Image: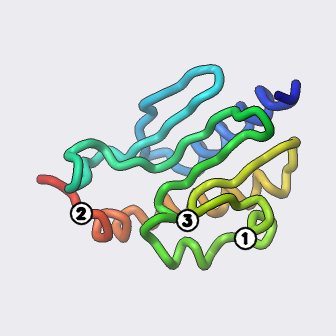
Amino acid sequence: MSDAFPAIFADLKAVMLGAAPGMIITQDTADQFTLKTGWPEARTGEPAWFGWIAIKSAYVAYHLMPLYTLPALVEAIPPALVKRRQGKTCFNVKKPDPDVYAALTELTALAARMEPELRAAIGTTP
């Protein structure tokens, strides 16, 4: 693990919190951070996952879960993030990068604004 990862983790946590202020913190440790929605999803009855950040051995992972279900959000991934994307929802960050932070802020804020579409896509419980 790089000595820079804790600082990157803190930076990414600030990005996610700032871009998605309406979400609920469900985990906040030195190496894991999770945000969920304030409404329960239909499948589980639990708050829906919005995003999470984790320090891994080779990078800091930034997951934005609405990417699983919102094609318009996938289409909006900024070019600065394309090469950092792993799988459907994860972006890896290995060093501090203001351009990457700005792109993640933009994408995360868009995901938060698309909350009505997310609710429609995954369903909610009353």
Q: Residue at x 56, y 32 (%)?
A: 33
Q: Look at the picture and state if 82 lies above or below 84.
A: below
Q: CA distance from mark 1 to mark 3?
A: 11 Å
Q: Residue at x 64, y 20 (%)?
A: 30
Secondary structure under badge 3? helix
Secondary structure under badge 2? loop
Q: CA distance from mark 2 to mark 3?
A: 19 Å
N-terminal of the pair, mark 1 or mark 2, is: 1
Q: CA distance from mark 1 to mark 2?
A: 27 Å
N-terminal of the pair, mark 1 or mark 3, is: 1
Are there few (<14), some (14-19), or many (20+) residues within 10 Å of tag 1? some
Total labels drawn: 3
Residue 58 is situated, as x and y percent measured from the top left of the image, at 80, 38
Quarter of image, res 122: bottom left
Residue 2 is situated, as x and y percent measured from the top left of the image, at 87, 29
User: Left or right of 52: which side holds 123?
Assistant: left
Residue 86 is situated, as x and y percent measured from the top left of the image, at 68, 58
User: Left or right of 48: which side holds 67?
Assistant: right
Q: Residue at x 76, y 56 (%)?
A: 102
User: Left or right of 27: which side holds 118?
Assistant: left
Give amino acid for label 1.
Pro
Q: Look at the picture and state if 118 lies above or below 14.
A: below
Q: Which residue matches tag 3?
A: 110
Are there few (<14), some (14-19), or many (20+) residues within 10 Å of tag 2? some
Any mark on residue 78, and which?
1
Give amino acid for label 2.
Gly
Q: Look at the picture and state if 73 lies above or below 53.
A: below
